[in-house]
Image (spheres, rainbow, N blue to C red):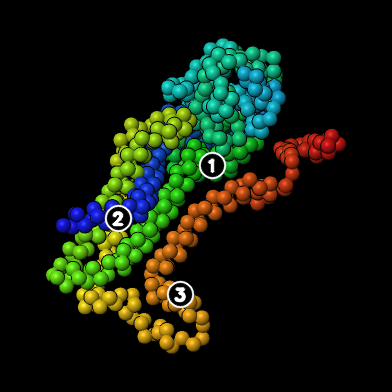
Amino acid sequence: MFRKMAYNHIKKNRLVTILLTLFITAASFLVSLAAIMTEDLLKSADAFVEQTKLPHFLQMHEGELDRVRLNEFADSQEDVLSLQISDFLNIDNSQLVMAEHSMTDQVGDNGFCVQNKEFDYLIDSNQNVIQPDEGEVYVPICYWKAFDLKSGDQMMVGKKQLTIAGFLRDGQMNSSFASSKRFLISEKDYEEIKPHGEEEYLIEFRLKDEKAVSAFSEAYTAAELPCNGPAITYPFFRLIQTLSDGMMIAIIVLISILIVLVAFLCIRFTLLTKLEEDFREIGIMKAIGVSAKDIRMFYLGTYIAIAVAGCSCGYICSLLVKNIFLSNIHLYMGKGSNGVLGCVLGLLGCVLIYLWIVSYVSRILRRIRQISSALALRDIGGEEKGGKNQWSLAKNTWINTNLFLGIKDVIIRKKIYITMLLLLIVTVFIMIVPQNLYQTMSSSRFITYMGVGQCQMRIDLQRQDDYEKTSMEIEKLL
């Protein structure tokens, strides 16, 4: 009997049922997708930094380099596993052309290097350490993607022509947030293009314990070793590798939370409205001997069916489209896991949403116990019981009758109207916040919030001996 009643209830309220199912589907889809992406991102990042053997401490330096002092310092530190000094040839972007794409408009630094021997490896799409042949160049993956490059395309470095052999994954500068990018070439080609650029040094240390990097950084600074450039530690490398995709996951989680909240408010609103509509029928069923538990199970069974359908559809949809969302992670860092754990976590997320819905509906349905069959048969609603005398129309002498009846209805049925208000607030929040965020980020004044003046061009000068002279020359040119 209850199964037939539940079926008739769903059939009668078809539109409401479809909308609730869609909200639950969307929430389950996003929660499952966020779980899958988080697991894959963390596993891929772990595998990536392990394969590239990132340095635990990196000091960039421009100028003269005292290698003897660096070696003595490394020998004196018990935590140092190995020291490596990598040459980085910084070349002006105006001298770089890739497959007819000029790099003049690029604002980041672009440099060339050879493959490292001990750690900080540059790897290919198969996670193998690259050993370029003479005349070959491997380009950063961001340029490979942005310019739609292919193996065999030509690259010009000044007057030197190189053949693009593929793209590389760089543990240090892979992320789009990194301001510098490394191109990999052979040692002979490096010597040939050396006159076209300015050589910098990457002073890299691998430690026995990565947790000791803070103490090591302080020791390096105290020793007054070469430091004409930024110093970067291992935790920062990990952060910048996961920042881009991590932000997308955070946005997905935020949206999923808001959709779950909307779904719960919709469930509350529809369920309270339905209980009010069925108030007399519930009283009749209780009067003929149907227990409150059985009546509660009728309504609960309806929402269990909706929750199961929505969570199942959301989980299946997340499995169908996960490769689309994971493609960027796999492109930049490779595949670090088989995805089984991510699918299990996604399923657990959907199960958690299902349990929340069932628990939430059960709490609302507790009020069935409070419904009196005597009052229901007299058609006196539970919401009306406490405020009937207080809101008597006969006592109203101070406001318009229609306005009074409207206020009376809102106050007596305040739970339903509060739910509608919350639903409206959350819906408006979902629509307005992304738009305001976009307007803020696209505003020309946004950069001023970070302490930079509003301007069309900015020139940064490193503080050197001839700093004031260089500044005056730039002022004359401008």
Q: Tell me if 172 is positioned left or right of 209 in this view.
A: right
Of the two numbered discs 2 and 1 in the rendering, the one whose residue sits closer to the viewer: 2
| Nearest to viewer (mark 3 / mark 1) | 3
Relative image position of residue 305 (x, y in whole percent): 26, 51
Q: Rounded to the nearest whole Å, what is the CA distance between mark 2 and mark 1?
A: 69 Å
Of circles 3 and 2, the one toward us is 2
Count of labels shown? 3
Local packing at callout 2 (Cα closer than 10 Å; few below 14, some 14-19, many 20+) is few
Residue identifier under label 3: 406
Asked if marks 2 and 1 touch (Cβ < 8 Å), the reply is no
Residue placed under numbered mark 2 in the picture: 12
| Residue wearing tag 1 | 217
Give neighbour class at mark 3: few <14, some 14-19, many 20+ (Cα, 10 Å).
Answer: few
Horizontal relation, residue 11 to residue 230: left or right: left
Q: Give how far apart the Cα atoms at labels 3 and 1 are.
A: 69 Å
Q: Give the quarter of the image for residue 381.
A: bottom left
Rendered location of residue 228, percent (x, y): 65, 36
Q: Amino acid at mark 2?
A: Lys
Q: Secondary structure at mark 3?
A: helix
Mark 2 vs mark 1: which is more N-terminal?
A: 2
- The structure residue drawn at horizontal position 35% and vertical position 61%, both measured from the top left corner, is 270
Q: Nearer the viewer, residue 235 or 77?
A: 235
Tag 1, which secondary structure?
helix
Q: Nearer the viewer, residue 119 or 138?
A: 138
Residue 452 image label = none
Check the picture and name the quadrant holding the N terminus: bottom left
| Residue, far top | 134
Q: What is the x, y in percent for residue 139?
A: 56, 23
Q: Secondary structure at mark 2?
A: helix
Which quadrant holds the C terminus? top right
